[in-house]
Amino acid sequence: MKDVIVIGLGAMGSMTAWQAAAAGASVAGVEQFTVGHSRGSSHGGSRIYRQILFEGKEYVPLARRSLDLVMDLERRSGRPLFTRSGGLVIGTADGPLIRDTLASAAAGEVEYEWLEPGELRRRYPQHAAFDDDVAVYEPGAGVLRPEACIAAAVAAAERAGAEIRTGSPVEELRVADGHVEVVTGGETIRAARAVLATGAWGLDLLPGFSLPLRTQRSCLSWFRAATDPAEYGPARFPRSSGRAARWTDGASPTSTARASRSASAARPASAGWTGRRTTGTTPPPRTSRPSRTSAAGRSPA
């Protein structure tokens, strides 16, 4: 009987199998498709990485630790898994997106730089910024290669002794006598614990549980640069998160956002701070004025 069986070997499952096996547990990993397949939520060539998390400052230690593990995995695999490009969060100075971003940076003592509207446009003219847009620049952010990360984690799990099965859909998951039983390919695998990392298929394996969960599709898009591709590479174009524009009156962002592109857009930051101390311009005080809806964006790989 295994200590752990991991069902689903996407981003979460592959890393879980690797870490459990590395900790000395006997592990079985089961994947219904191939490693790094395109049917789940862990494919497409690139995923954002950041430590400043406006979703909640509680995630900062987890994000920091995850990068340590990814860099360890990169060394073990000999494959490039992470590209540091820096990252931008764009919004109004008094809006919830920027407010939560600053709170996350302060709580986690994450290095960042404050960009006023003029500086945002000068350094990153690729963004069609509004007149009241400011930005928080995180130099440590970047882009992960999800398929390569998954393949490297599964290989590391196997080297640590994990038994990996691909092309093995789970037909049934049972709990019996203090252990779990997973039926796949007509065979029953027993383990002390099971980790469900099945994404959209999770509820299919738990028909006897009434959980307040629903599957929601999230569509990602990648765009090919219409002009010089180098302007949107990691040296010139940080991965970005921002607010969704709502042009109800037919207006568009000011034309000055399309200012002349120059080599200065790639110049390293000179004034920055962490959550403990600041240099340069200090962010303005927040007010209760509402801001536009926020949305997450993706940068090209």
Image (spheres, rainbow, N blue to C red):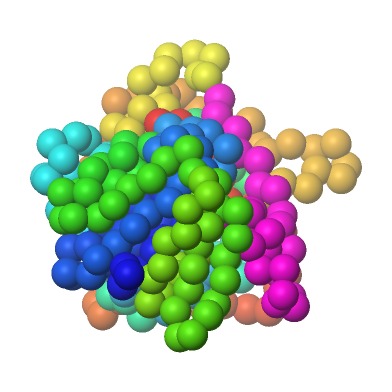
What x and y, as percent, mark residue 84? 27, 43
Q: Tell me: 56 left or right of 139.
A: right
Q: Residue at x 47, y 59 (%)?
A: 188
Magenta residues, start to end? 197-223
- Seen from the viewer's position, the closer of residues 73 and 33 is 33
- Seen from the viewer's position, the closer of residues 39 and 232 is 39
Q: Is residue 75 magenta?
A: no
In the image, residue 129 sits, relative to residue 5, either above or below, namely above
Q: Residue at x 16, y 55 (%)?
A: 160
Can residue 190 be seen?
Answer: yes
Using the rendered view, name the quadrant where residue 17 is placed.
bottom left
- Seen from the viewer's position, the closer of residues 116 and 1 is 1
Quadrant for the N terminus, please. bottom left
- Seen from the viewer's position, the closer of residues 224 and 148 is 148
What x and y, as percent, mark residue 92? 60, 61
Q: Residue at x 52, y 19 (%)?
A: 224
Secondary structure mostly taken by the magenta-highlighted segment of the chain: loop
Q: Tell me: 93 left or right of 51.
A: right
What x and y, as percent, mark residue 173? 57, 65
Q: Tell me: 127 left or right of 48.
A: right
Can residue 271 be seen?
Answer: no
Using the rendered view, name the quadrant where residue 79 is placed.
top left
Residue that protrudes farthest toward the bottom in the picture? 178
